[in-house]
Structures are given as structure tokens and as C-alpha cells.
Amino acid sequence: MTGLEKVANGHFFQNFTLLVIVLNGFWIGIDVEWNHPSLKKNGALPLEPTSIVVENLFCVYFTLEIALRLVAFGKRNLDKKLRFWFIFDSVLVTFMVIETWIMLIVDAITGGGGGNFLSKFSTLRLLRLTRLTRLMHSLPELLTLVRGMINAAKAVSIVLGFLVLLMYVFAIVFTSQLGHSESPEKMEDNPYWIRDSDPTAQELFGSMGDSMMTLFTRGLLGDNLAETLEAIKDRGGEYTCTDADENAVSPVRTPGDEKVCMRTGGELWLMWVFVVFFVISAMCLLNMLVGVLCEVIEATAASEEAESEISGLRHNIEDSFRAVDVSGDERITRKEWKSMRTNKDLRVSFGRLGVEENCEQQQMDQIEEHLFARLDTIHMLDDDNSWMPQAPASEAGGDDEGGIAIEEFLEHILQIRPDVHANLLDLQVLRVRAERDEQHFNAQIDIIETRLAKVASEVPVVPHVALAGVSSLNKLAEEPSENAWLRGLSMEVLFAELKHRADLLANASPPALDLE
């Protein structure tokens, strides 16, 4: 990593750039409020020349930032996950350079003749506000919230669609009972909200549009709920007119006379229908909508956290591998892994995957055994001498490990991460593998049985107390059941006997056996 790459990737440079972006956003607000073109006097804006200096400072810094990132990483910006932000920032900085410097030069060349066109082009400065979206890259919580809202769009749309359907159905009910195309209230010059009087039920539910708006504002949102219930119960009946009375409630004056007209009475059951709508919509569906949003955002946060852990693990594996890789084959061997596992950052990443600190060494050994034991050479006993002990690869000077590619290595790590619980599929896979290994082991036992029987009958007598078992093996070999004489022995006893016999042969240096 070069010096420029370290600077561009450094926390100080990234955090300082983010601070400059935020300050630029604040400056745009100040410029719009106190440096608006409408405030120009005598050909100059109120904040000039300070505003010119500030604009040039921002433009210089953002240009140097893009140049530094371009020189430090080159074309690799187009191949990494940050390429979108690099292209995005480059386009915005290009517009900023055009507005701050290029337009000024063009205006000077044209003598101000293209002022109208250039003034319209200057509205592109508002695009700088979009750079504030970089905050989401630096603050994962904001990005999680936005992604949660996007992921919840389908569920929210279903709930909102159900609310619209519910309002439509109840609007039909109320309009059919209270609506009237020629109701006296429609003869009034001003509606109830202008004349500041209590509305009647016919004014609230006079048409489908009025009914749906009333159900939305007063039923779903609960605005003026008591007034709506009173209008349905007490001001939804017959329309009657009486002489003017200063104490009359909710007067509706007819044009040209001094009589006061009003509606009295109403339908009690319609009031309870409205209450039912309020309970279903405001208390149930809206709370359900909030619950859906919370659940989706929680699931999104968990997914984001898992992706962040995997990304951090991948980054630490690659960094630690680059530090110990001398062959350049892009494959991790057991020897390289033993050096990698001492990396502090890598151990922290494994801790986030569930590797407990108090038994970290043991679990790391188990991970190593799972990853590299399957690469050990499986010596199939396909010849008469294949059972003989062989020197380890480290003593023989060779390496029996082909290594694991980084992507495959990471995939196996994620498959055995301790914080993931086993499911039924994992148990089925384990059962199949166990059955397969058992079949392979039984086949090897059969081969060992045949070899032991043959060696036991031909091995020369060696003066050692442990050879007393040879006669018993010869007797067992003569038994009718050819494949059952070793079935009663445990693996530990069998392998101990094999090792013991190999040591005896090595110490006695007997003549070579012709087992053909």
C-alpha cells in the first residue's frame, strides 16, 4: 500500500472530508437565506466577497479530494464497492467546478451576455446537497433505516391498500344513509369551516368524496373525533327551521329570512359504525403498520450487521494472508493459517462470529482441523505395504497440503461459525457423511484384517514379550468367520497393536517379507 493509499484510506482524511461536506451543506442554506440574488444591491450580493472566497475554498478542497483518490487508487476505483461513491462524487465536483470557475470565465468572455442562461445553470449547485448522502456511508444506522423503509415498501403498500378499501366500504355505508345531492346545507354560501359552526352529518358525509375525506381525517387520524360523533348522533336527522334565536346551536340561516335552520336527531347505530371504523383503522391497522415497519427494520439491521461481520472477516483474512503469503499462489495452507491466526484483528473478527474468548484456542484448533484435515492424504490400503507407517510430511520435507483458495476458505469458515445453530438439514448431512465414513472404515477394517492374518502367519519369531499375541492372532485367523475376528476389538486396541508390531519389526530388522 503506497503512501497516497494510506492517506486516502485513513480515518482522518475520510472524517475530515465528511465534515467539509456537512459544512458545505450548512453554507448552502446560509447562502440561500442571506445571499439570495433578490437581495443584490448595486450589482453585489450582501455576503460578497466573503461568499466568493468560501465557494472557492470548497471547490478547491473537493477537487483535490477527487484527484487524490484517483491518483491513489487509479482504475481500481471502478472495480471495488466504493466505485459508485467515487463516480457520484466526481460528477458533483465537476458541476461545482463548472459553476464556480468555468461559468465565471464564460461570463467574462461573453461580457455578461449569457447571464440568463448561466443563472439557470447555477441551480445545479443544489445537487451538492446530495453529497450529504455520504453520511449514510459513514453512519450505518441511517443506511439501515433507509433500507428498512425500502424493504418494508411492499408490506406498507398492502396495509395502505387495505385502509383505502376499508374507507371506501364505510364511505358507501355513510353516504347511502346520510348523503343527499339536494340537501339544504349545499345552498349555504360558505361551508361550515368558514362560517365557524359545528358541521352536520350531511355536510360530513354528503358525497363519496366527503365521506372518504371525513373517514380519513376524523376516523383514521382521529381529528375532531367527538365533534364527528355528535354530528352523526345529534345533527343528522330532520332539517327544521325556527325563528331566529340568539341561543340557537349551530344555526344555518336560509337566504333572505331571519329563520334559523338546523338538523336535530340522528342515527345512533351509525355513530357506533363510525366507532368500529375508528377502532379497526386507527387502533389496529395503524399500529399494525408501525409493527411491520419495526419488524422489517429490525430484520434489515440484523442482515446489515451480519454482512458487516462477514465483510470485516473477509478484509482481515485477506490482509493477514497477504502478510504471510510468500508463494503468491492465492491459496491458504496449514502453515500459513498458523501464522494468520495470531493476527489480532482476525481474532477479533472471529470473536464477532461467536468464537468465545475463554476457549478461543480450542475453537481455533477445531476450525483448523475442519479446514485442513480433509486435505490430508487418505492412504487407501490398496497394496500389501500400504498399512506400514509413513513419515509425516514435515519430516519428509514435503507438503501434502494443496491449500485452500481464499473464497473457499471464507465459505468454509461461514459454514462452521459457532454462533449459527444446527438445523435439520445439517443433521441430515451429518448422518449421510457418518454413514459414508462408516462404510469406508469397514472396508479399511476388512483390508487390515486380511493383511494382519497374512503377516501374523509369516512374521519371524522375535524375542519380545509382546509377540505372545501372534499365536492368538494365528488361531483367530483360522476361525471360520473370516470377517469377524477383529470386530470385537476397539479402534484404540487395533491401532496400538499395529504400531507395536511396526516398532518390533523396525527394532528386529527382519528380512523383507515376500507377500506376493
Image (spheres, rainbow, N blue to C red):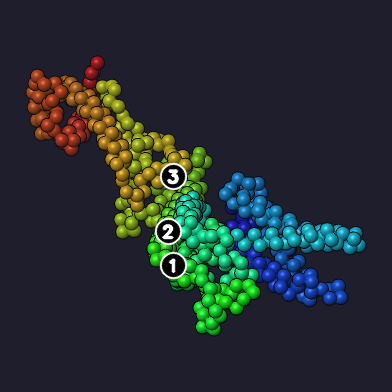
Query: Residue 101 is drawn in which quadrant?
Result: bottom right
Left or right of residue 457: residue 207: right
The residues tagged by marks 3 and 1 sit, at their Cα atoms, a distance apart of 72 Å
Q: Is residue 207 above or below residue 366?
A: below
The residues tagged by marks 3 and 2 sit, at their Cα atoms, a distance apart of 44 Å
Q: Which of marks 3 and 1 is nearer the N terminus?
A: 1
Q: In which quarter of the image is the C terminus?
A: top left
Tell whether label 2 touches label 1 (CB within 8 Å): no
Residue in the foreground of this view, choosing between 463 and 61 = 61
Residue in the foreground of this view, choosing between 105 and 118 = 118
The amino acid at mark 1 is Gly
Q: Mark 3 points at which residue?
A: 410
The amino acid at mark 2 is Leu
Q: Name the residue under label 1.
A: 266
Q: What element carries label 1?
A: loop
Q: What element carries label 2?
A: helix
Q: Name the residue under label 2.
A: 285
Q: Earlier in the sequence, mark 1 or mark 2?
A: 1
Residue 40 locus on image (x, y percent)? 81, 73
Q: Is mark 3 on a helix, strand or loop?
A: helix
Residue 389 locus on image (x, y percent)? 27, 32
Label 3 neighbour load within 10 Å: few <14, some 14-19, many 20+: some
Mark 3 against mark 2, which lies toward the viewer? 2
Left or right of residue 376: residue 483: left
Left or right of residue 134: residue 363: left
